[in-house]
Amino acid sequence: MKGLHRAASPLVGQDPGLVLRVMEASDLDVVCALDRAAYAHPWSAAIFRDCLRFGYDCWVGEIERGVVAHAVTAIAAGECHLLNLCVHPSWQGRGLGRAILRHLLDTARAREVDTVFLEVRASNTRARALYHSEGFGEIGIRRGYYPADQGREDAVTLARVL
């Protein structure tokens, strides 16, 4: 993947135990299990496989060599779309999501991205608070964007100019 380091590297200035590295196809089983643990409507292995195949920036976050988080971004034409940022429920609330988000923003800046976009479930107040605290603002609503247990759920579209 263009612009990514293959070697694992700790997030400087963040949790000293969290190491981010490029996601490999061999990570898909554990990444999918993590997604299932965190989300009622997780991505399929095929979606992650396609992200790897299309050259999206795909990361896993490890603590003591165990995968506890992952993230996927698509960068093109001066824009970055954050597609997935997931921290295992047992590791949430410890600043890992914020550390990963900041790494993704730094990576986008290094790739000369102007604006980062994302969608978040309207009901995901913790994630929305994180994104707002990191400078994202609401720019719209996508009606019925996400599957839900009872029909569909709206997504709030957020953006941050870098």
Image (cartoon, rainbow, N blue to C red):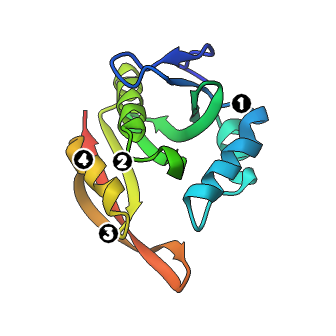
Q: Residue 24 carries which label?
A: 1
Query: What whole-number distance in Å separates the C-alpha atoms at marks 2 and 4?
Result: 9 Å
Quarter of the picture containing the N terminus is: top right
Badge 2 or badge 3: first in the primary sequence: 2
Decide: few, some or many residues near mark 4? Use Cα within 10 Å; few <14, some 14-19, many ≥20: some
Task: Residue 15: tell me if it is visible.
Answer: yes
* Residue at far bottom of view: 150
Whole-angstrom CA distance, mark 2 to mark 3, is 13 Å
Can you give x and y, in whole percent of width and height, for residue 121 in the image? 40, 65
Element under disc 3:
strand
User: Given the image, on which type of amino acid does mark 2 rest?
Assistant: Phe
The quadrant in which residue 40 appears is bottom right
Q: What residue type is labelled 4?
A: Phe
Q: What is the CA distance from the residue labelled 4 to the residue labelled 1?
A: 29 Å
In-image side of 27 versus 161 (left or right): right
**Is the residue under label 3 in contact with that under label 2 (CB below 8 Å)?**
no
Residue at the image position 75 percent from the left and 52 percent from the top: 46
Identify the residue at image location x=36%, y=48%: 117
Rounded to the nearest angstrom, the CA distance separating label 3 from label 1 is: 33 Å
Check disc 2 and report the residue beneath it.
117
Residue placed under numbered mark 4 in the picture: 136
Which residue is label 3 attached to? Answer: 141
What is the secondary structure assignment of the residue under circle 2?
strand
Q: In the image, which is nearer the foreground, mark 2 or mark 4? A: 4
Mark 1: few, some, or many residues within 10 Å (few <14, many ≥20)? few
Q: Earlier in the sequence, mark 3 or mark 1?
A: 1
